[in-house]
Amino acid sequence: MITYDLDSIEEMFLKIKFEDGQFAGQRIHFDEFSTCGFATCTCYNLHISDGERTFLFQVDEQSVRALAEEDMAFAEAIEAELNDEVWDELYELFTLEKGLECDLIPISKVTNNFSETEYKGVLTDGTMLFYDEVFPHAMDFHVIVDEIEYGLMDLYCLNPSCDCNKVTLQVINDEYEEPLFTVEHNIKHNTFKLDDEEKVIVSNQKVQAILTEIKKEFIEPKIKGISYAERYTRMRTVFKNFLTRRGIPQNYFPGTRLVATIGRNDDCPCGSGKKYKKCCGK
């Protein structure tokens, strides 16, 4: 038997009474819920504890693992008790908690690595990156027009030499494989401009209606507690810190060798305690 309340942060709980099997008659009361604590991690693990034992609930695969080997049988029994309704609630809880973590965890605690293709693209070609490419579980932002939801995918320029103060918004909808249109938002001046170089696949009337709703949201430009301006700062800081760790020049021009000045056998500057070649130098 399962009882739960996963909506109230103050009184959140999940209770299980085992009716059958080796734990028949036993009860477990979970009231501690957390994510892994790494904002750039791609896992779907909820750490759930009853105060004595901690289990990893993998909400995408709907499986349960125990942190301690002696609790593995208990984890299997818990997994067998959970139904789709509870898993859906746990997935929503994970989405909320991880989304808040992505946007609100102090940037000093965020470490992310960029591939050679990514950082060279940023520094040489002006490649922009989506926020959820760096923070995979970031919260979504959307507007509603005529009872239809349109998502906004936010891209940022990360080049430290550029001071564009710009976020590019791709407007998407599940009915279309491509973005409907693209908007450039100047954070400093709070202006919006339709990107004329990108294809528009909906009517001008629909574009204007969606733009109107976007502008309304930007009167107080918040994404569930964080503004695009704050996301802009977070993205650029994470990238700049990456360049510093790798010893890559921030003012890069074609022909400059992008090589790290850190020895492969030196301690990694990220503070992990590992050798550079075993950590950020991989």
Image: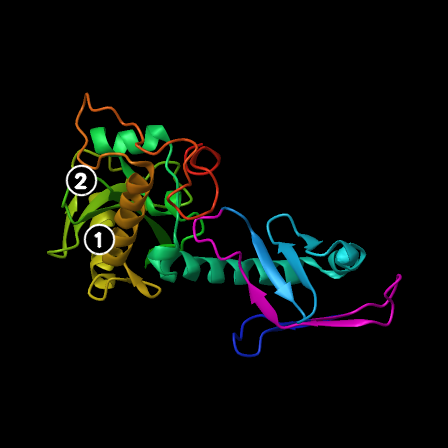
Image-based side of 263 in relation to 96, left or right: left
Which residue appears at 21% of the width and 57% of the height? 212
Residue designated by label 2 = 195
* Residue 280: percent from left, percent from top: 42, 38
Name the kind of residue labelled 1 in the image: Leu
The segment highlighted magenta reads 15-41
The foreground one among 117 and 95 is: 117
Q: Residues within 10 Å of mark 1 (few under 14, many from 20)?
A: some
| First in residue order: circle 1 vs circle 2 | 2
Instruction: Name the magenta segment's main secondary structure.
Output: loop
The quarter of the image holding the N terminus is bottom right
Which residue appears at 53% of the width and 75% of the height? 8
Name the kind of residue labelled 2 in the image: Asp
Which residue appears at 60% of the width and 53% of the height? 59
Q: Secondary structure at mark 1?
A: helix
The quarter of the image holding the C terminus is top left
